Image (tube, coloured by chain):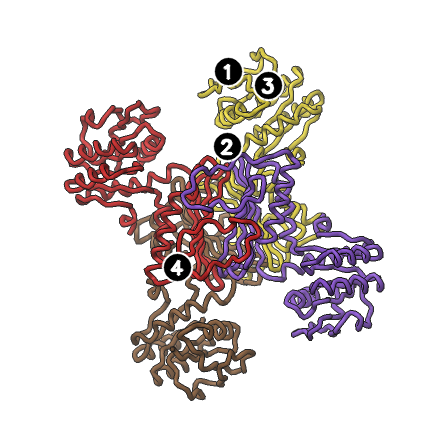
Chain colours: A yellow, B brown, C red, D purple
Amino acid sequence: MTRIVLVGGAGRMGQALAEGLSRRENLEVVGLVDVHEPAQRFSAPYYRSLAEVDVAVDAVVDFSRPDSVVTSAAWCAEHGAGLVVGTTGLGEVERDALQRAGERVGVILAANFSIGAVLSERFAALAAPYFERVEIIELHHDRKVDAPSGTSLVTARAVVEARRRAGRESGPEPTERHTLEGARGADAGGGVRVHSVRLPGLVAHQEILFGGPGEGLTIRHDSFDRQSFVQGVALALAHVNERAGFVEGIDHLLG
Amino acid sequence: MTRIVLVGGAGRMGQALAEGLSRRENLEVVGLVDVHEPAQRFSAPYYRSLAEVDVAVDAVVDFSRPDSVVTSAAWCAEHGAGLVVGTTGLGEVERDALQRAGERVGVILAANFSIGAVLSERFAALAAPYFERVEIIELHHDRKVDAPSGTSLVTARAVVEARRRAGRESGPEPTERHTLEGARGADAGGGVRVHSVRLPGLVAHQEILFGGPGEGLTIRHDSFDRQSFVQGVALALAHVNERAGFVEGIDHLLG
Amino acid sequence: MTRIVLVGGAGRMGQALAEGLSRRENLEVVGLVDVHEPAQRFSAPYYRSLAEVDVAVDAVVDFSRPDSVVTSAAWCAEHGAGLVVGTTGLGEVERDALQRAGERVGVILAANFSIGAVLSERFAALAAPYFERVEIIELHHDRKVDAPSGTSLVTARAVVEARRRAGRESGPEPTERHTLEGARGADAGGGVRVHSVRLPGLVAHQEILFGGPGEGLTIRHDSFDRQSFVQGVALALAHVNERAGFVEGIDHLLG
Amino acid sequence: MTRIVLVGGAGRMGQALAEGLSRRENLEVVGLVDVHEPAQRFSAPYYRSLAEVDVAVDAVVDFSRPDSVVTSAAWCAEHGAGLVVGTTGLGEVERDALQRAGERVGVILAANFSIGAVLSERFAALAAPYFERVEIIELHHDRKVDAPSGTSLVTARAVVEARRRAGRESGPEPTERHTLEGARGADAGGGVRVHSVRLPGLVAHQEILFGGPGEGLTIRHDSFDRQSFVQGVALALAHVNERAGFVEGIDHLLG
C-alpha cells in the first residue's frame, strides 16, 4: 500500500485526483495539503502545509503552484518520499529544486499524465517516417483562449523531429490557389500543418492524420474529463520509489 | 426506358457515367458524343457530334466543355429532348442558351450531382440556426491545388445565410493568443471557420461540425470515386422530361 | 420573461436544468419543487410540492417521476401554465392526464430534448430513401446496461419507416461467411444494422452511416453532458404557451 | 538499383505493383511473369514463366497462387535472388519451400504489405495493456462476403495476447439487457468486441477503440486503393537481400 499526500488537494485537479486515487487498490490518500480547505476530503485529513503532516508518507503528488513545488521537493528529500509533479509553469528555480531532490529520492515531472495523450505522441513519432505527409487537427471547447493547443505543438515537434531523423521531408505545399485565405492552417515546420477547431460542447480532442499512397492512418485522442489524469499519476506512483533520480515525462513507464 | 446520349462521353467523367448509367434499369445509353473516340463504348455507338446522331433520344447528358453546352442546348430544344448539364465553368453565353432551351424542354444544371453532397449542404443549412458555432473541415488528396474546396465554400455560404435568416450570430472568436499563426483556418463570414487538409491517399471528404451546450453534431460526406455522380444524374434524368424550364441544382428533386 | 417552476428540481437532471435555464435571458426560475431539498438552489426558492407555490408561474418543467406528472398536469390546467415534460416511463394514466391538460393549456412531452439528437433523427429519415444501405453505431460508457440504446432504436425505426414509404429496400445481407459469430450486429428490420460499443470514458454518441455508389454520408451526434438538454427545454418553453394542445416531441419546433 | 521480376504480374495486384514499383527510384521492373499476358507492361518484358527469364534479377516479388510460390522459391535459391511473397492461402508445402529457400537467400512473406495496417496492429498491441476495454470496428464495401475481416481478427488476436501478457483483463460484459439481439458484436476473446459494417461506397477501413477513465484512444486505418501495398513491398525489397533467412511480416522492418 502506497500512502500518498496530495499537495494542491483543494484545487479542481487535486480534488479529481483525490477522488480517483482513493478508489484504487494499493493506494491510500493520507492527506490533502492546500492553503484553502478542500470542498471534499474523500476521508483524508486536511493539512495547511506539508510541515503539518504527521503520518507516514510514501509519496507526494503535487498539482499546485510553482513556489509550492520547491517546498514539496525539499520535504520529500528530507522524508525519503517519492515526488510526482504535475504543476505547470515551472521555471529554473523549481527545476533545480526537483533536480536536487532527485539525488535522494525518485522525482517524476510530467506536463500530461493522460496515458492516451502520451501514447498518441509516441505513436505519432513512430509513424512519422513512413508517410508522405502529416497534419494535426486539435478540437477544444470555445473557452480555450490559445490556439493551437500546447499538446498539439508538442506532438507536432515530435513528428517533425522524427521525420528529420529519418531523413523524410514532406513535398512542397500542394495549395497554389487560395480561394479563401488561411484555410491551410498553421505550419509547424517540415510541412506539418496544425488546425484548431473551437466549438462549445467539445472537451479536448486531437487527431493526427498521416497520408501515403492509397492509405491513411489516424490517431485520435479524446479527453472527456479530468479522470484521464488519474491513471497516469497512479502509474507514476507505482514507479517513483523504484530508484532516486529526476525524470521528465511518463513515456518511459509505458513498456 | 429513357434513351440518352452522353456529350463528353470520351472524358473521364463521361466514361464513368457511360459505365454507371448503362447498368441502370429504365436507362439506355444510345450514343457517346465526343471529339475523340472513347476508350470504352459500353455497347453504345460513337458520334463525333450531336448533329450526327440519327436515333431517337429522350435526353442528353452533357459533361464536356462550355462551348459544347450551347450546341447541346440548341439541339435539345429542336429535338424535344431534356438536357442534364454537369459541365463547369459556364459563362453568361452558355447560361443564356440553357435558359432559351428551357422555354421548350426541361433543363437541369448542377455543380455537384453527388446526392450525399447535396444532402450534406441541406442538412447543414437546417442545423445552422440551432447551434452556437459551426466549423467546416474539408479533406482532399494532395494533388488538389486550390483551398478551400469549392464545395466547402458553397456549404459555408449556405450555413452563413441560414444563420443570418434565423438572426443567429456566432459569438466572438474565442482565440486570443496565437501560439502559432494561422491555426484557426479561414473565416467564411459570420464566424464560420473552414479548415483544409491535404494528404495523399485521401479522395474528397467534408465534415461540418456544429457545437452547442454539451453536444456536437457532425455531418460527414465521403466521395470515394466518380460513381457518386451517377446516382444524381440518374435522378435528374428521371425528372428532366416532366416539364419545360431551366432549373439549377438537384436539391429540389430530393423529396 | 417566462417564469418557470422545475418539478424534480433536486434530481440530477433538475439541477442541471436549474443551472442552465437560470442563465438564459427571457427565462426566470421561480421555484424548485421536489420531495427532497436540492443541493443547489440557483437563487430560486424551494417548495415541497406545486401546491405550495405562491408566486406567478408561466410554465412548469417536469423531469421527475410518472406519478408526479399527473399532479403537474392538473396544476397547470388549473393555473393556466404551460407544461413541458421530460419524465420517462409514462403509462396510459399519465398520458391521459397530459391529454386532458392539453385541452386548456399547451403541453409538450419529449423523450429527448437534445436538439442534436432530434436533428440527427430527422436527417436520417430524410437521407434514408437515397442510399442503398444504412447502419447505425451507437457508443456509450460501460455503465450502460442496455444495448442497443433507446435512441438508436428510435432512429432505426425512423430510417426503416422512411425507406418503406419510399419503396426502398436494402439488398440481401452481404455476409455469407462468418469467421466469428455476431460481428454484423443487430438487425433492426429492412437490413438496417445496429452496433453497440461500450467503453469507459465515452459519454453518449451515435453515428448513422449511409452508403451508396462511390460515396458515404455520416451523421454523428455527441452528447457530452446534460447541458445538451437545456437548449431543447428552452425551445419548448418558448413555444408551449402559444396554444393549448398536447404534442409529443420537439421536432416540429425546429423550423 | 534493384532489378525485380513480378510473378503474377498480369493479375490485379501484380498490375498495381508493376505500376507503383516502376515509378520508384532504386527499383527497376525487369520482367512480368504470368500465365496470361498482362494488360499493361509498364515497359517491362513479359515471360510465361520464371524459367524463361534471361536477364539479371536481384529479387522476385510473388503475388500469384500457392503452387507458383514453390517454383519461385526454388528459382530464387538457385539464382541468388531475394524473394518477397504476398500470395495468400499458403499451406505446409509452400511454407517448407520458403523455409528451404531461406537457407540460401532472403525470403519475406507477409499477409498485409500496407504500412498503415502494420503500424495499426503494432500500436494496438502497445496500447492494449493500458486501457480497461477495447473494441474494433471494421468497415468494408458490401461485396465482401466474410465478416469480420481477416485483418480485424489478426488485430484482435494481437490485442488479446498483449493484454494477457500484461495481466490485463476486461471487466465483465456491461450489457445486461438486450433490447435487440446481437448489437454487441462478436467476442474475439478477453472481452474484445469486433463489429463489422458493410456499406457500398466504402473500401477497407478499421478503427481500434480504447477506453479508460475519462479518455479514449482510437487508431483508424483507411485503405483507399491497392497502391497502399506498394510502399510495403518496396520496404521489403530494400531489406530482402541483407541476409539469408525466412521471416514473416514486415513489422520488424519498421524501425
Looking at the rendered structure, which numbered label has been put on residue A3? 3
Image vertical order of residue B22 relative to residue C26, above or below: below
Residue B253 at x, y percent in the picture: 34, 66
Image vertical order of residue B189 relative to residue D16, above or below: above
Kindly identify the residue that appears in the image at 21 percent across and 28 percent down.
C50
- Residue D60 found in image quarter: bottom right
Q: Nearer the viewer, residue A82 or D145?
A: D145
Secondary element under disc 4, as helix, strand or loop, is helix
Q: Are callouts 3 and 1 both on one chain?
A: yes
Q: Is residue B160 visible?
A: no
Other-residue count near label 1 (Cα within 10 Å), few / some / many at <14 / 14–19 / ≥20: many
Q: Nearer the viewer, residue C137 or C28?
A: C137
Q: Are callouts 1 and 4 both on one chain?
A: no
Q: Does the CB distance between marks 1 and 4 fall below 8 Å?
A: no
Chain at tag 3: A
Q: Nearer the viewer, mark 3 or mark 1?
A: 3
Secondary element under disc 1, as helix, strand or loop, is strand
**Does label 3 or label 2 sit earlier along the sequence?**
3
Task: Find disc 1 in the rendering and name its residue.
Answer: A46
Kindly identify the residue that appears in the image at 80 percent across and 71 percent down.
D51
Q: Are callouts 3 and 4 both on one chain?
A: no
